[in-house]
């Protein structure tokens, strides 16, 4: 299916919950309501025209200081149908997103990474803890208000002072 | 498998920490392995020892300044990483590169695929006790690194590809060196096969080890040779062709059993296909410019700067402020030696990416190690790990 057809089908099926649908460089992107995220994912995975059986990636984007602050972006691919889609949800600080690990096991580590880097909690995730950084790390380094060189401490003399 | 499960004699469960400094952990991988005797009950990879925050760095660099950082991802095959990044930026700004550049990129990407597979294979063999194969593989890898040196002066961290084309022309000397490689390489690959494919130890250590079904493999996010070994015929070069792969003839090797041995065979055959691709690309490579004719994106050659005022201005602008990309977001993926290597860029219209996400295959592939080694002997973990061929520069970003 072409990107236009994918967009049209998703929009028809989730008329009131698709907040935004965009086509850029021939890539389909839908912004959906957080409450229907799992329903959309389930539809994408099981619908015979979609068959998005491959979980490509999941990541966070920080739009600080806008509100709601974060965007969680999912990329899906269909191995049999050879098409892609990007699904996004917007969440505020402190809000959580439902996990999709029960639909695609591959989501396990990317969701942990999003938590590690942005502090986005995925509800229902079997092992919601940091993946790259040490367990006792303070702060979430990919957030826009986290300094590039980190905070000053005994191991990092070049970091910024914490206010 | 069921029979094996029953055979486990319950003893005191021990937890073994393998790595982060272990000769066969392919880098700084730390595996926490729960065992009953010799049987593995659970493997939990602990990664992040090489985490450098590449994505955060990218947010603070101009688009063209980030290319050298991509070399340090999968440092075994830097060309593929360069390619994934520059393709994504080109998609974002919406430029089409020249025909010659496309062929040069295909040749470089395939050379780096062979280089990556060779080291993966050599390290795997040495982990399982076949030292000779590593020495032979590195010998051939050396030829490829020499070609890279001839091409751009560097051997490992190449930064050869740039947004809009490539940095230096693909000279006749490089062409001859590649033709020479294509000529000698098949016999060398046969040589490895005589050492490994029929070798009883190699078969014992790999056949039926780390079996994963096609459904499980796709569900766990495996990609590249590891997924194809389970019988899933998915290769981005074929299914979503980029550059000129749709004009070249090559096959996509797949396995049947999804075990370590099939992953080995798939990689072997992939190298043969890469040689086919290189041969055709060398033959069909047209003459012409190797950079796009947009001075904001590809500044004029350095000697012009001293004679031409406009060239000087373009150079100055390029170095000091880079080029702007339109507002929007793109995801672009290539078939790297390890699997799907994707770059997702969110642009806010400035000359730096607002957010850059690398979808790295080593990271995703490593998730399946628990599934593959559960219930098996501890020694099989080594074989499974090597068959996934993770590189930690890439996995830890």
Image (cartoon, helix red, strand yellow):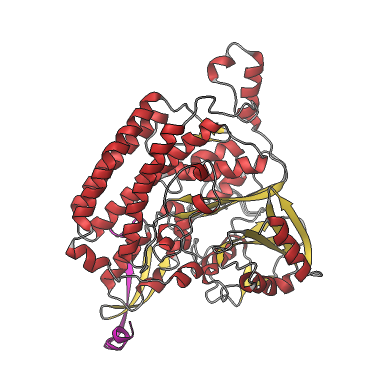
| Residue at image location 32% in from the left, 38% down from the top | B182
Query: Measured from the top left, where is residue B27 in percent x and y?
Result: 35, 55
Q: Nearer the viewer, residue A99 or A96?
A: A99
B121 left or right of B282 in image:
left
Q: Can residue B341 be seen in this view?
A: yes
Q: Quadrant of the N terminus of chain A?
A: bottom right
| Residue at image location 48% in from the left, 62% down from the top | B364
| B6 within the magenta span | yes
| Residue at image location 42% in from the left, 32% down from the top | B283
Query: Measured from the top left, where is residue A80 in percent x and y?
Result: 55, 64
**Does B95 appear above or below A73?**
above
Q: Nearer the viewer, residue B301 or B192?
A: B192
Q: Quadrant of the C terminus of chain A?
A: bottom right
| A74 within the magenta span | no
Q: Nearer the viewer, residue A64 or B346?
A: B346
B252 left or right of A29 in image:
left
| Residue at image location 46% in from the left, 39% down from the top | B106
Total residue callouts? 0
Q: Is residue B76 visible?
A: no
**Does B324 appear above or below B119?**
above
**Does B144 appear above or below B150?**
below
Point out the residue furthest to the right here: A16
Query: Measured from the top left, where is residue A92 in percent x and y?
Result: 73, 65
Residues in magenta? B1-27
Query: Measured from the top left, where is residue A19 in percent x and y?
Result: 79, 63
């Amino acid at each position: 299916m072409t990107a236009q057809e994918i967009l049209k089908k998703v929009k028809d099926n989730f008329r009131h919950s698709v907040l935004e649908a965009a086509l850029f460089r021939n890539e389909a992107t839908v912004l959906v309501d957080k409450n229907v995220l799992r329903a959309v994912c389930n539809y994408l995975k099981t619908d015979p025209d979609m068959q998005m059986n491959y979980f490509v990636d999941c990541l966070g984007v920080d739009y600080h200081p806008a509100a709601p602050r974060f965007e969680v972006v999912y990329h899906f691919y269909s191995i049999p149908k050879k098409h892609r889609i990007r699904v996004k949800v917007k969440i505020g600080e402190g809000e959580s997103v439902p996990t999709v690990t029960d639909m695609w096991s591959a989501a396990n580590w990317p969701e942990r990474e999003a938590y590690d880097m942005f502090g986005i909690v995925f509800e229902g995730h079997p092992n919601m803890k940091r993946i790259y950084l040490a367990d006792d790390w303070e702060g979430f380094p990919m957030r826009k208000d986290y300094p590039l060189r980190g905070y000053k401490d005994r191991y990092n003399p070049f970091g910024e002072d914490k206010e | 498998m069921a029979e094996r499960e029953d055979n486990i004699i319950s003893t005191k469960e021990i937890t073994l920490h393998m790595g982060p400094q272990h000769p066969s952990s392919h880098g700084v991988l730390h595996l926490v392995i729960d065992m009953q005797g010799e049987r593995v009950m659970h493997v939990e990879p602990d990664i992040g020892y090489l985490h450098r925050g590449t994505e955060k760095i990218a947010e603070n660099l101009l688009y063209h300044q980030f290319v050298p950082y991509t070399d340090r991802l999968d440092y075994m095959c830097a060309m593929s990483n360069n390619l994934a990044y520059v393709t994504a930026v080109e998609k974002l700004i919406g430029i089409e590169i020249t025909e010659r550049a496309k062929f040069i990129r295909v040749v470089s990407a395939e050379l780096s695929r062979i280089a990556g597979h060779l080291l993966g294979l050599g390290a795997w063999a040495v982990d399982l006790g076949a030292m000779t194969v590593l020495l032979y593989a590195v010998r051939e890898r050396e030829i490829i690194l020499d070609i890279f040196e001839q091409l751009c002066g560097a051997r490992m961290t190449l930064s050869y590809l740039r947004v809009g084309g490539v940095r230096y022309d693909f000279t006749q000397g490089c062409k001859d060196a590649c033709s020479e490689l294509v000529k000698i390489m098949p016999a060398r690959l046969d040589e490895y096969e005589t050492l490994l494919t029929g070798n009883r130890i190699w078969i014992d250590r790999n056949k039926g080890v780390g079996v994963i079904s096609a459904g499980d493999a796709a569900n766990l996010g495996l990609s590249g040779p590891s997924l194809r070994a389970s019988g899933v015929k998915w290769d981005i070069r074929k299914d979503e062709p980029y550059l000129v792969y749709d004009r070249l003839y090559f096959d996509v090797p797949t396995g049947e059993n999804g075990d370590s041995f099939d992953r080995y065979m798939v990689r072997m055959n992939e190298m043969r296909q890469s040689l086919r691709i290189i041969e055709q690309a060398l033959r069909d490579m047209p003459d012409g410019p190797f950079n796009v004719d947009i001075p904001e994106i590809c500044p004029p050659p350095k000697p012009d700067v001293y004679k031409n005022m406009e060239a000087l201005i373009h150079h100055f602008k390029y170095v000091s402020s880079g080029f702007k990309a339109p507002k929007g977001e793109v995801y672009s993926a290539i078939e790297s030696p390890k699997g799907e290597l994707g770059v997702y860029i969110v642009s806010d219209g400035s000359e730096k990416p607002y957010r850059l996400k690398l979808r790295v295959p080593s990271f995703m592939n490593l998730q399946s190690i628990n599934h593959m080694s559960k219930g098996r002997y501890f020694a099989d973990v080594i074989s499974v790990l090597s068959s996934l061929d993770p590189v930690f520069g890439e996995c830890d970003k």
